[in-house]
Amino acid sequence: MVVSPFLNMIVYQLSNQSAKYFVIIFAVFVCGYAFLKNDGHIGVNRGYSFLFACCLYLLGAAISKGLLLQQSCKSRKWFGCWGIVVICNILFTEIALVVLKSGKLAGVLQVYNSPFVLIESVCFFMIFVNMKIDDSSLAAKIIRNMSWATLDVYILHSSNKVIPYFRNIPMNYLVEHGNVALAYLLVIPYAVIVF
């Protein structure tokens, strides 16, 4: 990334307190802006943007420096946090759909720059950071294979126009026939099956 030196300067040259506040405020801005206007001149674009990439870079640098999260916590704690945030995300999405009848709000809760999705990602990352696994174990091999496959899935998901169309036929059927709430409940199991 061309702006890496500038982003590193923010995290490593500022005082710990200033860098911490800057990263948190920047992440809140990028995630919060999605609720106001998803596409615009700053290019938030549901998380597929340069701005969000900068946000993730800053978060990663702050975590690496130890400004935001304790890396000494056990993986179980992070797994519990991840599970709670996933359940809250599903719950708020269902409330947006069923109670508020707002598909737009429900959609914003599912995009990459959603606060829930961002927190889920950080918790999931911290689960793996804090795992104590022998490099020759079966679990280590599975994790290594999952990590390279993740990039392939992301590329297929974000850039190919054919696969997402066919992949989404069952979910689109549910939405078109008025089962939007059921579609959102099935998103995570469906994603696991598809990928």
Image (tube, grey):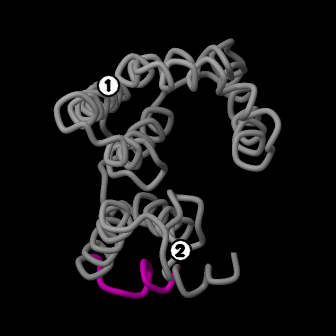
Residue 20 in which image quadrant: bottom left
Residue 102 image offset from top left, x and y in percent:
28, 42
* Mark 2 or 1, nearer chain start: 2
Magenta stretch: residue 118 in it? no
Which disc is residue 43 wearing? 2
- 13 in the magenta segment: yes
Dot 2: element = loop
The residue depicted at 42 percent of the width and 78 percent of the height is: 11
Circle 2: is it few (<14), some (14-19), or many (20+) Cα within 10 Å? Answer: some
Mark 1 and mark 2 in contact (Cβ < 8 Å)?
A: no
* Residue at the left extreme of this rendering: 99
Between 120 and 43, the one lying in front of the other is 43
Relative side of 104 to 148, left or right: left
Left or right of 155 in this view: 64: left
Residue 180, relative to residue 119: is it above or below? above
Q: Quadrant of the C terminus?
A: top right
Image point 32% across, 25% down: which residue? 83
Quadrant in which the N terminus appears: bottom right
Segment colored magenta:
8-16
Q: Residue at x 72, y 20 (%)?
A: 141
Return the x and y of residue 150 as percentages of the image width and height. 69, 36
Q: Quadrant of residue 169?
A: top right
Q: Is residue 131 visible?
A: yes
Residue type beneath disc 2: Gly
Label 1 is placed on what type of residue? Gly
Report the mark closest to the observer, 2 or 1. Answer: 2
Majority secondary structure of magenta residues: helix
Instruction: Find the distance from the CA under tag 2 to the CA under tag 1.
Output: 30 Å
Image location (x, y in percent) of residue 164: 72, 35
Seen from the viewer's position, the closer of residues 80 and 176 is 176
**Residue beneath label 1, please?**
83
